[in-house]
Image (cartoon, grey):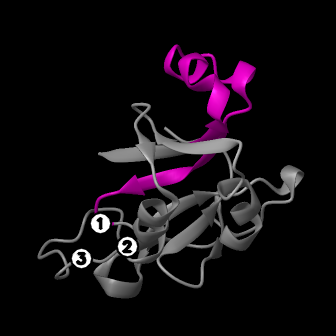
Amino acid sequence: MGMNFYSIQKTNLSSFLSGDSAANDTYHIGKSSYGWVFSLHVDHDRGIYDLDDMLPMLTDSKRIIVDEDGKEISLVKLMLTIMSRSMDKLPTEPPSYYGRNAILGEKNLLRSKLGLDHCVKHGAGTWDCIIGDFS
């Protein structure tokens, strides 16, 4: 289970809620999934290679940050979600993909292995830089 986060134009929240993402310049920031580092959605075509590249969009006064349910999220809360993630302890029984597709990252979190078609970089903290489609 996870939660997706988006940056949208303030004036287009109703379009976002109706599912019309093309009409409102929606940018998918990334996904928070239990037990994993944050999956930061990077887009090389837009010049977004890491979290620092995304900051101008996240601090733009004409945009807001929302979760997939359309609830507005503060920049502080989003940054804590991205940068201050942790698990109290390691799972007693690691998931089956641990070792094949995942490695143990910081603060007892799993992170994607590099070079698996989607993870292009491990962030400097508790996030991975991911390209491609998200579910």
The answer to which of marks 2 and 3 sits earlier in the sequence is: 3
Which residue appears at 60% of the width and 77% of the height? 122
In which quadrant will I find the N terminus? Answer: top left
Residue 18: x and y in percent read: 52, 13
| Residue at the image point whose x is 25% and y is 64% from the top | 95
Residue 94: percent from left, percent from top? 22, 71
How far apart, in angstroms, are the residues tagged by discs 2 and 3?
10 Å
Q: Name the residue: 71% across, 61% down.
A: 54
Callouts 1 and 3 close, C-beta under 8 Å:
yes
Name the residue furthest left: 92
Residue depicted at 60% across the width and 78% down the height:
123
- Whether residues under marks 2 and 3 lie with C-beta atoms below 8 angstroms apart, the answer is no
In the image, which is nearer the foreground, mark 2 or mark 3? 3
The reply to whether residue 99 is in sight is no
Disc nearer the start of the sequence (1/3): 1
Q: Is residue 8 magenta?
A: yes
x and y percentages locating residue 93 in the rendered image: 14, 71
Decide which of tag 2 and tag 1 comes sooner along the chain.
1
Q: Secondary structure at mark 2?
A: strand
- Mark 1 to mark 3 CA distance (whole Å): 7 Å
* Nearer-the-camera pick, 39 or 84: 84
Magenta region, residue range = 6-35
* Residue receiving disc 3: 87
Tag of residue 35: 1
